[in-house]
Image (spheres, rainbow, N blue to C red):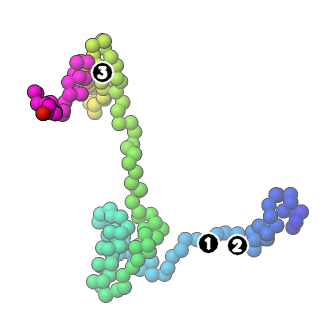
């Protein structure tokens, strides 16, 4: 075994452990009572899409009304995952591009022009353009400022 370990470049103890380990890893963990809980959970999930914590709360409410013991949220999550009933994870990413227009300047006095061309369901093409003169940039910078009070001294010469 040492010659094989040297040839493969691994430790001999690793090879010995792999020989004693079963060929196929253990499957998913499950309890016999999971099959009894699945119809209750499926009835809640089929009615509306909830997360596993809400499904646990609603399922425990149903189980308590029947006089049965409540279940743990981790167990409900495991049952949902084993049967493919979990929700898709939330990400802040939006599918596709949010802006597919072209930004161009038509002449020197125009700050920016956003031209968007979109295809409608009927096959027509719509175009929208927005022009802002460069003088509006200064107006925008002053917007929201309070004007200074005139002829009010900041200090007094007494």
Task: Decide: is 33 above or below 27.
Answer: below
Assign the N terminus to one quadrant of the image: bottom right
Residue 148 painted magenta: yes
For disc 2, the marked residue is 22
Q: Is 41 left or right of 3, judged from the image as shown?
A: left
Q: Secondary structure at mark 2?
A: loop
Residue depicted at 34% across the width and 27% down the height: 101
Q: How many marks?
A: 3
For disc 1, the marked residue is 26
> Magenta region: which residues?
133-157
Q: Quadrant of residue 129?
A: top left
Q: Quadrant of residue 137?
A: top left
Residue 90 painted magenta: no
Task: Decide: is 47 above or below 137.
Answer: below
Instruction: Determine contact: label 1, label 2, CB under 8 Å.
Output: yes
Assign the C terminus to one quadrant of the image: top left
Q: Secondary structure at mark 3?
A: strand
Q: Looking at the picture, how far across and down is residue 111, in whole percent?
A: 29, 19
Q: Residue furthest left?
A: 151
Q: Looking at the picture, how far across and down is residue 20, in whole percent?
A: 75, 74
Kindly tell me whether residue 35 is visible in this rendering: no
Q: Quadrant of residue 141?
A: top left
Mark earlier in primary sequence (1, 3)? 1
Q: Which mark is residue 112?
A: 3
Instruction: Determine contact: label 1, label 3, CB under 8 Å.
Output: no
Question: Magenta part mainly helix, strand or loop?
Answer: loop
Q: Secondary structure at mark 1?
A: loop
């Amino acid at each position: 075994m040492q010659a094989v370990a040297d040839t493969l470049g691994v430790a001999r103890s690793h090879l010995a452990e792999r020989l004693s380990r079963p060929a196929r890893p253990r499957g998913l963990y499950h309890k016999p009572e999971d099959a009894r809980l699945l119809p209750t959970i499926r009835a809640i999930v089929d009615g509306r899409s909830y997360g596993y914590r809400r499904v646990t709360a609603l399922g425990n409410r149903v189980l308590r009304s029947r006089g049965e013991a409540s279940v743990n949220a981790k167990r409900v999550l495991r049952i949902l995952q084993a049967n493919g009933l979990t929700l898709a994870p939330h990400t802040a990413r939006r599918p596709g591009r949010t802006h597919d227009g072209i930004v161009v300047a038509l002449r020197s006095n125009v700050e920016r022009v956003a031209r968007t061309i979109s295809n409608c369901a009927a096959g027509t093409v719509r175009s929208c353009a927005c022009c802002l003169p460069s003088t509006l940039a200064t107006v925008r910078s002053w917007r929201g400022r309070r004007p200074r009070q005139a002829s009010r001294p900041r200090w007094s010469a007494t």
